[in-house]
Image: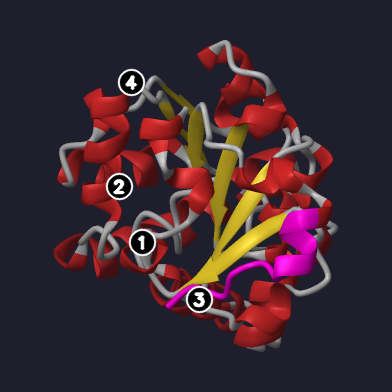
Amino acid sequence: MPTMPSETSARDNPARETPARALIFDMDGTIVDNMRYHEDAWGRLLKAYGLPFDADAFFHRTAGMASDEILRPLFPAAGADEITRLGHDKELFYREAYRPHVAALPGLLALMARADVAGIPMAVASAAPPGNIDVVIDTLGLRSRFATIIAPSQGFRGKPNPDLFLGAAERMAVAPEDCIVFEDAPNGIEAARRAGMRAVAIMTMLDADAFAGFDNVIASAKDFNALDGLPALRFSEA
């Protein structure tokens, strides 16, 4: 079951329960439960260069960031071409390992079907490079379901900057406050907060305590099945 906002918080801020007019999904760890494959790929890359790797600390610090934003401080002497090559190698490691295991998080497709029926537009806002987005979105056959797909490869800054989410809202012609973001990482929740958007924390990697300090989080859940009773997702009331 989701961790729902308290009666006091809902009463003090009724806008938290206002039905969404658009949905924005992070991809890694949200549409699919794949972050451990990314961790393994990062560990493989960094250990090959003799760099230390702590999976939990790395996730907390970097989830939602573009790969070049992650790599520059790790390889300060590397030029732009070298940073690009390192990022390419890491993504090859990841795609090789994860491609046979692509699967939507439970309840996602049912939520998307309800949104479609209600005419609620949906977007993906992911820090992933195009090749990784293709592996997930096209393997699941979801590309036509999204009004837009936003990524740093299009010139947007990565999270915790709000650019990806604001770009998605603009392309869907929906005000930020009418969007709900689904995210698995504090960097992404912070990006949604900066964008003025409510967020649902998807707990594929972290528990609810990791998101307790964010006042824009309206629920935390292990998967989308646990969100059926969330007032903000009762689209028939919109």
Q: CA distance from mark 4 to mark 1?
A: 19 Å
Which residue carries the number 4 mark? Answer: 119
Q: Amino acid at mark 2?
A: Leu
| Residue 111 badge | 2
| 3 or 4: tag closer to the N-terminus | 3
| 4 or 1: tag closer to the N-terminus | 4
| 1 or 2: tag closer to the N-terminus | 2
Q: Quadrant of residue 155?
A: top right
Looking at the figure, which quarter contains the N terminus? bottom left
Q: Nearer the viewer, residue 229 or 38?
A: 229
Q: Are marks 3 and 4 in contact (CB under 8 Å)?
A: no
The percent coordinates of residue 217 (x first, y second) are 69, 59
Disc 4 on helix, strand or loop? loop
Which residue carries the number 1 mark? Answer: 224
Q: Are marks 1 and 2 in contact (CB under 8 Å)?
A: yes
Give above or below for 134 relative to 89.
above
Q: CA distance from mark 2 to mark 4?
A: 12 Å
Report the side of 19 relative to 120 (left or right). Answer: right
Q: Is residue 3 magenta?
A: yes
Residue 121 in sight in this render: yes
Q: Is residue 112 magenta?
A: no
Q: CA distance from mark 1 to mark 3?
A: 23 Å
Q: Are marks 2 and 3 in contact (CB under 8 Å)?
A: no
Q: Nearer the viewer, residue 4 or 179?
A: 4
Say which of marks 2 and 3 sits in front: 2
| 1 or 3: tag closer to the N-terminus | 3
Residues rendered magenta in the picture = 1-11
